[in-house]
């Protein structure tokens, strides 16, 4: 079993909020939660081969404020699966139970709480013993919980020791984002000891601005107003030693470079989002491998903003540089430039300029499958029709068993704020990947490469996606609301016996439903949406002027919704008030809390939602040092 895999970047979702901070009592029963139900179904089948699925469910329970129910679920699974579990596996179950119990502690009657807390600490101690004190997530959970326990329990020394262990053993963490909370809580401990200098130093390392944090972030994602979103810390990797280089975390997209067979030419895959980010990535590569040859060719996998926007920088490096792209590239660029411009800066940063996309033009337009050689390297260019764009192109290096596939399986099936995406094109493109069966399958963004990692995985996934399409189209024909289709928790027959596709299917499911619904439902819908043309101001008028809702009532309703984990509904309510309460500090604080919780909920499963929720409240999340 993989004790801690790199894919645990999806690990805790919203589960690790300050342990005693969010233990509100529930006011109402929760609405149907398909995400929670999906991960419950997975965890009921068998002990998960990859521990991320255990913790993904823990995150769903925590985000819904169902801590006691979650602790009970994992306790039942520990009893059921106990004879089959190794000690490290048992430690992970116990850690999940301990954290959920800690989050529930504030709901326990005062007279029972001391004993309850002691039992919770004993659970965490047992987890540490079973893990041999060597599993990062076990020590991390213990450190966070001990740091949040009231001083009366005298656990600050233990907390400091656990958190310091995490800093010392940072290389064992799934990624650098896990250290945010470690530094944050070490800073809080220093502040409690009166050492403000040390506290500020730790706070700086965490990337947070203050010690008033109602959420916890362990995501590798980062948001910067100037530079935009990155999916991971900066990292340069040699996929094929000395031949294929991958650069992550320099901006929104990946950079790939290939050294030709004769060693005399350098080939790039895609051109990035902005000239400045292209320069930063290229110069970092040159510093990493100074003997690389001159860049002579760039292949564009598709003409989205983030794959062509840096082309002017590369052109300036070599006047003889040749760009290869699909001949229908201009159609995609026109779509890019006609999409709502408000999203440009949120995704790509203030330095992004749409003119850098508008000016792109390839030297060699590709219409059909094309084979060529550059510096002795055989290259096969394969046009595909989907799933994200119709100008997609695979770049296959058969002698290196490497296939660059761009964003063909981007879960959103195109940018979610413009009309594109081809589901059948996605299925057809999967067939091409399966046929080529490369050893290295490299996508346009780091999470895609991690989660859609092989041709064999895609072969397993394809029939489940086809099944999902038929279910969605059938529901549409019956006049189902989009929300009802999501809440049906559609799980294909046979999927629960294929652990490798649990996460890829989950990542795609929501967005396949949304894209198919958008493409097959007109602007008048069965629930009468689209028949009226009401604005946000109209809804604010209804809410405030006709229903008489005050800012105090608004805040009270939002607090109840948040306690029930209904953050989307709370955000909808807040947005319905428009600008009517813009001068209310209480409403502003409630709005910030709700969007922070939404960031926390999607911090490791949906980067685009994370971006938009962050932008809604102007929240920035600095990039952590990749370190390892």
Image (tube, helix red, strand yellow):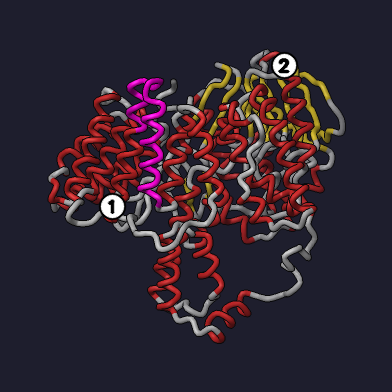
Closest to the camera, between mark 1 and mark 2, is 1
Give the residue pinned by disc 1.
20
Q: Is residue 259 above or below residue 154?
A: above
Is 568 situated above or below 166?
A: below
Label 2 secondary element: helix
Q: Nearer the viewer, residue 297 or 203?
A: 203
Are discs 1 and 2 less than 8 Å apart at CB?
Answer: no
Q: Position of residue 49 (x, y in %)?
A: 48, 25
Residue 446 locus on image (x, y percent): 56, 35
Our reading of the magenta stretch's main secondary structure is: helix
Residue drawn at x 25%, y 32% as measured from the top left: 165
Number of the label disc, if any, that sits on residue 350: none
Q: Which residues are magenta?
A: 66-93
Q: Nearer the viewer, residue 514 or 116?
A: 116
Per the image, is 471 magenta? no
Q: Is residue 336 left or right of residue 37?
A: right
* Residue 576 in the image, given as x and y percentages of width and height: 56, 72
In the displayed structure, would residue 406 be above or below residue 352? above
Does residue 72 show up magenta in the picture? yes
Question: Which residue corresponds to mark 2?
Answer: 398
- Quadrant location, the C terminus: top left
């Amino acid at each position: 079993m993989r004790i801690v895999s790199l894919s645990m970047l999806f690990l805790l979702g919203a589960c690790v909020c300050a342990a005693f901070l969010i233990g509100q009592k529930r006011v109402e029963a929760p609405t149907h939660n398909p995400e929670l139900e999906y991960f419950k179904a997975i965890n009921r089948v068998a002990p998960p081969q990859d521990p991320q699925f255990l913790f993904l469910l823990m995150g769903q329970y925590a985000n819904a404020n169902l801590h006691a129910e979650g602790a009970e679920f994992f306790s039942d699974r520990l009893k059921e699966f106990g004879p089959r579990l190794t000690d490290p596996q048992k430690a992970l179950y116990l850690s999940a139970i301990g954290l959920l119990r800690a989050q529930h502690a504030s709901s326990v009657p005062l007279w029972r709480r001391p004993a309850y807390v002691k039992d919770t600490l004993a659970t965490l101690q047992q987890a540490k013993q079973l893990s041999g004190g060597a599993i990062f997530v076990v020590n991390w959970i213990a450190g966070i919980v001990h740091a949040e326990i009231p001083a009366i329990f005298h656990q600050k020394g233990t907390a400091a020791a656990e958190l310091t262990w995490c800093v010392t053993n940072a290389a064992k963490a799934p990624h650098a984002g896990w250290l945010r909370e470690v530094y944050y809580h070490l800073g809080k401990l220093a502040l409690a000891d009166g050492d403000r200098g040390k506290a500020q130093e730790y706070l700086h390392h965490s990337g947070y601005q203050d010690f008033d944090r109602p959420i916890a972030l362990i995501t590798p994602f980062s948001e910067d107003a100037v530079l935009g979103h990155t999916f991971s810390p900066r990292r340069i990797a040699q996929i094929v030693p000395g031949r294929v280089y991958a650069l992550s975390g320099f901006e929104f997209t990946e950079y790939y470079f290939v050294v030709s067979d004769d060693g005399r030419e350098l080939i790039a895959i895609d051109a990035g989002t902005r000239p400045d980010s292209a320069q930063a990535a290229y110069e970092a590569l040159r510093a990493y491998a100074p003997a690389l040859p001159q860049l002579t060719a760039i292949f564009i996998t598709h003409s989205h903003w983030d794959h062509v926007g840096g082309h002017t920088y590369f052109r300036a490096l070599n006047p003889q540089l040749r760009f290869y792209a699909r001949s229908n590239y201009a159609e995609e660029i026109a779509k890019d430039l006609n999409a709502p411009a408000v999203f440009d800066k949120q995704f790509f940063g203030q330095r992004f300029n749409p003119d850098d996309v508008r000016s792109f033009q390839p030297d060699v337009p590709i219409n059909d499958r094309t084979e060529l050689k550059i510096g002795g390297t055989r290259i096969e260019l394969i046009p595909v029709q989907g799933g994200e764009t119709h100008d997609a192109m695979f770049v296959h290096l058969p002698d290196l068993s490497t296939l660059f596939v761009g964003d063909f399986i981007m879960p959103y099936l195109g940018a979610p704020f413009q009309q594109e995406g081809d589901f059948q094109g996605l299925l057809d493109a999967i067939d091409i990947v399966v046929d080529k069966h490369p050893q290295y399958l490299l996508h346009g963004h780091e999470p895609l490469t991690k989660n859609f990692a092989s041709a064999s995985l895609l072969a397993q996934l394809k029939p489940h996606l086809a099944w999902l399409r038929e279910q969605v189209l059938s529901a549409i024909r019956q006049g189902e609301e989009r929300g009802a289709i999501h809440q049906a928790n559609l799980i294909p027959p046979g999927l629960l016996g294929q652990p490798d596709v649990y996460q890829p299917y989950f990542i795609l499911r929501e967005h396949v439903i949304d894209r198919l619904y958008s493409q097959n439902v007109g602007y008048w819908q069965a629930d009468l949406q689209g028949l009226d043309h009401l604005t946000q101001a109209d809804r604010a008028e209804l809410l405030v002027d006709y229903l008489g809702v005050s800012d105090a009532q608004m805040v009270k309703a939002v607090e109840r919704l948040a306690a029930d984990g209904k953050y989307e509904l709370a955000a909808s309510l807040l947005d319905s008030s428009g600008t009517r309460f813009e001068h209310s500090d209480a409403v502003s604080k409630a709005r910030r809390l709700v969007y922070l919780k939404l960031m926390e909920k999607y911090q490791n499963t949906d980067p685009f939602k994370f971006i938009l929720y962050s932008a809604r409240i102007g929240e920035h999340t600095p990039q952590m040092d990749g370190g390892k």
